[in-house]
Amino acid sequence: MADTALSPRPALSDIGQSHPGAGVTIGERHSLGIAIMHVRKGLASALQERIRQHFLLELPNRPALVSAGEVAFVGIGPGAWLALSDKGGHLFSTWLRQVTAPLASINDQSGGYAVFRVGGRAIREALAKGFAIDLEARAFKVGNAATTIVSHVGATIWRREDFPDGTACFEIAVARSLAHSFWAWFSESAAEFGCDWRDAATRS
């Protein structure tokens, strides 16, 4: 039997609107490796130490983002993290499983989530129409994260370092099957400011 190669596809491949100068920008991050990591009972300290030694970072024990190189971890609940890699796709979860064995359970979600990078001068006003959390700079600092509901869609949002133009940069993870529902809400919320769909491979 011939092998069937699976190639990653964008969750919103039919979206390609570009409106330079708009007040809100959005782009989907492609080819990410995504996994859910759960610490096993009684092994929290050992997992923290393993991650510290391997990645030179501290796993957050609250809703927060930490990153080192191409790998990031987002706290999404007690003893649970969303792990992301800029490269590797589905292979990332296999590698992370080897790194953390036998301290954590790793579930590949590379095809299960869509991650969007959003920004622009009016991004907070647009997000405030659905996110019932305070996203102002003093309350939601760089590295902060939250898991919530937006327009009946479960979402995890975290704040990255600002874009080069000084506007805030957020990333939002939603279930891939609900990506179109999220886009319907986001595009409507951003309509009054103008919405520019851009390639999220770069942060410019």
Image: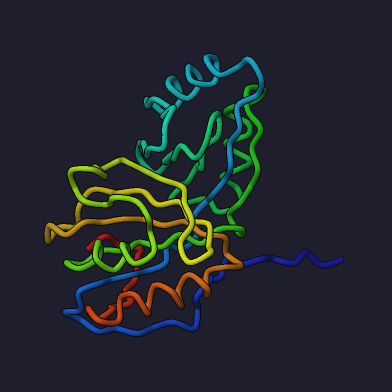
Q: Residue at x 34, y 71 (%)?
A: 199
Q: Residue 132: where, in percent of width, then height?
A: 37, 55
Seen in the image, is 158 located left or right of residue 169?
right
| Quarter of the N terminus within the rendering | bottom right
The residue at the point 26 percent across, 60 percent down is 203
Q: Position of residue 152 (x, y in %)?
A: 53, 64
* Residue drawn where x is 45% and y is 59% of the image: 115
Looking at the rendered structure, the number of numbered marks drawn on it comes to: 0
Left or right: 136 as drawn, with respect to 189? left
Left/right placement of residue 97 relative to residue 201 reads right
Q: Position of residue 122 (x, y in %)?
A: 20, 68
Q: From this viewpoint, which residue is outermost toward the right?
A: 1
**Which quarter of the figure has residue 40?**
top right
Nearer to me, 19 or 194:
194
Q: Which image quadrant for residue 201?
A: bottom left
Q: Where is residue 35 drawn, in percent x and y? A: 57, 45
Residue 154 in the image: above or below residue 79: below
Q: Taking 117 as reference, is 34 above or below it?
A: above
> According to the image, what is the colour scheme of the structure?
rainbow
For image coordinates 28% across by 71% down, the residue present is 25
Q: Nearer the viewer, residue 163 or 186?
A: 186
For the C terminus, the image quarter is bottom left
Q: Along the horizontal axis of the image, is 135 left or right of 105?
A: left
